[in-house]
Amino acid sequence: MSPWRAQVLVTSNERHKKRLVIDYSQTINRYTELDAYPFPNINQMVSDIAKYKVYSTLDLRSAYHQIPLREHEKKYTGFEANGRLYQFRRVPFGVTNGVTCFQRVIDRLVAENKLEAVFVYIDNITIGGTDQNEHDENLRRFLDVTDKHQLTFNEDKCVFSVESVDLLGYTISQGVLRPDPDRMKPLRELPVPHSTKSLKRAIGMFSYYSQWIPRFSDKIKPLANATSFPLDSIAVKAFDDLKSDLENASISAIDEAIPFVVETDASDSVVAGSLNQGGRPVAFFSRTLNAHELGHSPVEKEACAIIEAVCKWRHLLSGKHFTLVTDQKAVSYMFDSKKHVDDVKRTIKQCQICAKVKPQYAKTNASPLVKATQPFERLSIDFKGPLPSVSTKKYILTVVDEYSRFPFAFPCSDMTSATVVQCLRQLFALFGMPAYIHSDRGQSFMSAELKTFLQSHGVATSRTTPYSPQSNGQCVRYNGIIWKAVTLALESLGLKESQWESVLPDALHGVRSLLCTSINCTPHERFFNFTRRSSSGQSIPSWLAHPGPVLMKKHVRATKYDPLVEAVDLLEANPTYAHVRLPDGLETTVSVRHLAPRGQPINYDNLDHSVLNDRTTDIDESDIENTTQDVTSNMDNPIETSPVVRRSTREIKKPCRYGFDD
């Protein structure tokens, strides 16, 4: 039983053989989701088959009918015949996905059994071999698999152990491809076009076989430009030449192990190319130039031919070395520009005038940076200033720990060696002696006084080379970072730039607490190995910052009607714990997660009772009558004052809340 019913049709072929077909176009095909399973690429398949020398071709008998249907799918194939309803047990012809289903099944059969040299295109199966023995072994394995799955063949259409085979419009023999003679018969018998319609038909047929004809676009041009009939002698000759070229056409099969040679050329109106291997063509390409391309220069047309050819065969050329042949020297220069660029560079280097006007300074290899291995091991120092100041201190001595990027900044009144020594004494008293100090070539850093002081404390020194501030780049960079932080602080507080000394500590705090991506932590964390606490803001809620009454969660209640919380006195608190005094006077420590603000008490004496009275006013019929009379009288005497609004005499009682009454 099936809810589907397709109609039966009877057709006949050219041999007047009648065939029964089912029209599924109005039933299941209208509701079938398309299966986009890909078919093999014919050109690629033919090239792969041409690598072998012995072939056999097999044709499956009623191919689709050899694929069984699942039980729940059979009902969809229902059709009516002779007053009865039938359904198929195998895949029928005419269903939407019959072809893709069959191709998928045969491909899976070949892959799962690891069959070699077996090529399947729907019901056409080709088995190849490089010699007779290999062919026979591949054929035997394939037939064993088909016997196992009970596949049958149309023996009248099967061909075994031949050296030439006609397949998918090609004749394949000994690695050479030719057009199938049977497919070429309509073209050989094609008469000279006598009308526009017949001319378009001829051009279309020639275009289909254009891959077999070298410089096809040039040869078809007389026909494509013909506008009158009968055709002139030039067009007729082009027509006959194209037919002759097709009858004698042949190309070699592509063997990707052999290097490719791409030859290109361009004429006034056509670009063309050929793909060769071992001196024999394996593919042709040509295209007529567009109207705007006809005005291009010869060099541009030749370049266009190269680009078009490479794009055409990019699936074969990609990732491989190939030879490009062109007869245009200018294009050859474009594709071999590196050699000419090297010649130009060599000439420039030998020119004395160029060396004087555009000197090429030596580029030394960048030496690896000596990195510190622990905090306060290597320091970089530098001065910034003079700066506008309300005091005598117009300079900043910046000291940066290279390991942690932790900055120090000392306001200074001058840049003398004595000032540097004084600042370093303060720093050494706090953190001890560094192993190394690096600076630029400032006079205060080059002095014997500073050098003697550092040597006496066992500190090694180094200096940058002249005109090389990048050699002390870390400290120079932090000069800018610190001053930017100072500027932001001044702008935020509305202070003048000359008051920078007052905000310098906060600016340093911000820089030291800022994440440094090169070390993936803050300078403070790197230097001290713990997180820096903020000097601004509060880490606990404001109601925990001061002693006073709060609410504490009651963990033990006699009944569910007991209050959820009880009032306690907060004595002190930190972000995690709080010390409280219970109602019985006992003091204890609790988690701040169990505390809540008490809130502000409500003073009911200050409430606006008129609002409550308005909401609770009772209105009866007499009130409505009185109000109506009052409104009417007011309309007659608009100058009179409005009547007094009637108020309710209900007594307002204070609400009672369990556990919260004083």
Image (cartoon, rainbow, N blue to C red):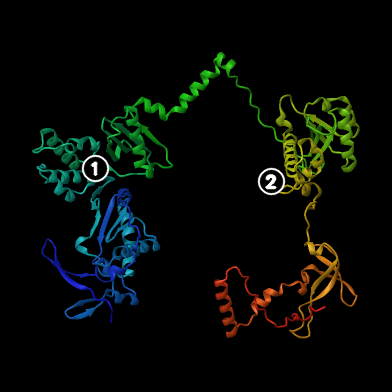
Quarter of the figure with the N terminus: bottom left
Q: Nearer the viewer, residue 348 or 295?
A: 295
Q: In the rendered view, would you say 51 is above or below 303? A: below
Quadrant position of residue 538? bottom right
Amino acid under label 2? Answer: Thr
Residue 554 pos. (x, y %): 79, 77
Q: Nearer the viewer, residue 103 or 616?
A: 616
In this image, 360 relative to 166: left or right?
right
Q: Are marks 1 and 2 in contact (CB under 8 Å)?
A: no
User: What secondary structure is marked by label 1?
Assistant: helix
**Number of marks drawn:** 2
Q: From where the camera sits, is residue 563 visible?
A: yes
Lower sequence index among marks 1 and 2:
1
Q: In the rendered view, would you say 128 is above or below 570? A: above
At 63% from the left and 22% from the top, the residue drawn is: 361
Quadrant position of residue 603? bottom right
Quarter of the figure with the C terminus: bottom right
Spatial distance from mark 1 to mark 2, Cα to Cα?
62 Å
Quadrant position of residue 312? top left
| Numbered tag placed on residue 564 in the rendering | none
User: What secondary structure is marked by label 2?
Assistant: loop
At 84% from the left and 29% from the top, the residue drawn is: 414
At 86% from the left and 28% from the top, the residue drawn is: 417
Residue 70 pos. (x, y %): 34, 74
- Mark nearer the viewer, 1 or 2: 2
Q: Which residue is mark 2?
A: 517
| Numbered tag placed on residue 210 in the rendering | 1
Residue 496 pos. (x, y %): 76, 37
Q: From where the camera sits, is residue 151 visible?
A: no
Amino acid under label 1? Answer: Ser
